[in-house]
Image: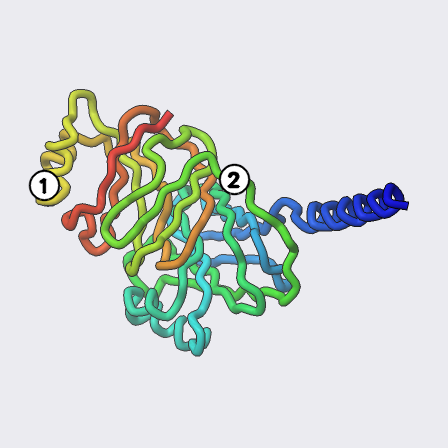
Amino acid sequence: MRRLISAVSLAAVLCVVGAVAAAQGPPSTVTVSATATAITGPAAPVAPGATRFVFSSTDAKIEFSVFLAALEPGRTVDEVTAAMHASPGRALELVQVAASATLAPGAQRAITVEIKPNTTYLLVNDGGSQDPGDIVTSQLATGGVATGAVAPSPDAEVRMRDLRFGGDRTLPRRGTVRVSNVGWAPHFALAIPLRKGARRTAVGRALVHSSERVLNRLLNFGRASELTNILSRGASADQEIRFRKSGRHVLVCFFERHDAQGMYRFVTVG
């Protein structure tokens, strides 16, 4: 009798474990296509949970930035859209940017994020212009039933907290880096290779003093890689990235002169 009870209990446990494993599948992929004058996502609501977004540029000439942003509670699409065209900086206070990337002509970028249930997201394209009037948007809705999808473990993690970078000091040249903004302000991260012979102390001094001439001598901006475009506070995104160069890099946030306030960190790519 005791053996029978044990067998039944074991079977029940295996059933539960099997159900959990079945529910925790890989993230589904959602494609977002963009030109300099349009951005288009899925028409049907997206199931909440870990979701892999592939942002694709179908424009052969212009580089532009794309964003996936959730409306903050109490905000409307019309309110946020008006703010984007009048003052993009103000619009950042009305949304949470969950993922973003700069797309070269004809390129694509894959980013996995946790999508919230019953939420209105905006897909935003800045059109590659400094004119806020060129910003175009479309809406993306989410459903209420989660997929149970779980994002794979990243190859490395980078944290942005207030005016500092944290996390791993070695990043894969090709792989997935989880970037989290756990501070109070929006940030982005550019990974710039150090030129041969460049000293960290000299690089840090030049960043703090915003010495463009010295920075161009010490850093190879032509081989820089975007780790992430703008991420709002509380956001975390898994960036699938291919760095242009291995070796010594410096991570820098140039947003609102955060670099001059010490927001940089030296890492090794490879």
**Callout 2 environment at 10 Å: few (<14), some (14 to 19), or many (20+)?**
few
Residue 190 x %, y %: 30, 41
Amino acid marked by disc 2: Ser
Q: CA distance from mark 1 to mark 2?
A: 38 Å
Residue pictured at 40% horizontal, 77% vertical: 79
Q: How far across and how far down the image is residue 225, in percent? A: 34, 37
Residue 110 is left or right of residue 161, and the answer is right
> Is 109 above or below relative to 172?
below
Q: Circle 1 sits on which residue?
A: 211
Residue 163 drawn above or below residue 203: below
Q: Say what secondary structure mark 1 lies in.
A: loop
Label ID, residue 6: none
**1 and 2 marks in contact (CB < 8 Å):** no
Residue at 36% x, 49% y is 229
* Front one among 41 and 172: 172
Q: Nearer the viewer, residue 159 or 223?
A: 159
Q: Position of residue 45 (x, y in %)?
A: 62, 64
User: Is residue 15 in view from this perspective?
Assistant: yes
Q: Is residue 96 left or right of residue 54?
A: left
Tell me: 233 left or right of 202: right
The part of the image, by quadrant, that contains residue 157 is top left
Please name the residue shown 20% across and 21% down the image. 196
Q: Earlier in the sequence, mark 1 or mark 2?
A: 2
Q: Is residue 36 visible?
A: no
In the rendered image, which quarter contains the C terminus? top left
Q: According to the image, label 2 marks what residue?
A: 153
Disc 1 packing (10 Å; few <14; some 14–19; many ≥20): few
Of residues 261 and 254, which is closer to you in this image? 261
Specify the quadrant of the image occupied by residue 209: top left
Q: Nearer the viewer, mark 1 or mark 2?
A: 2
Mark 2: which secondary structure?
A: loop
Q: Residue at x 65, y 48 (%)?
A: 24
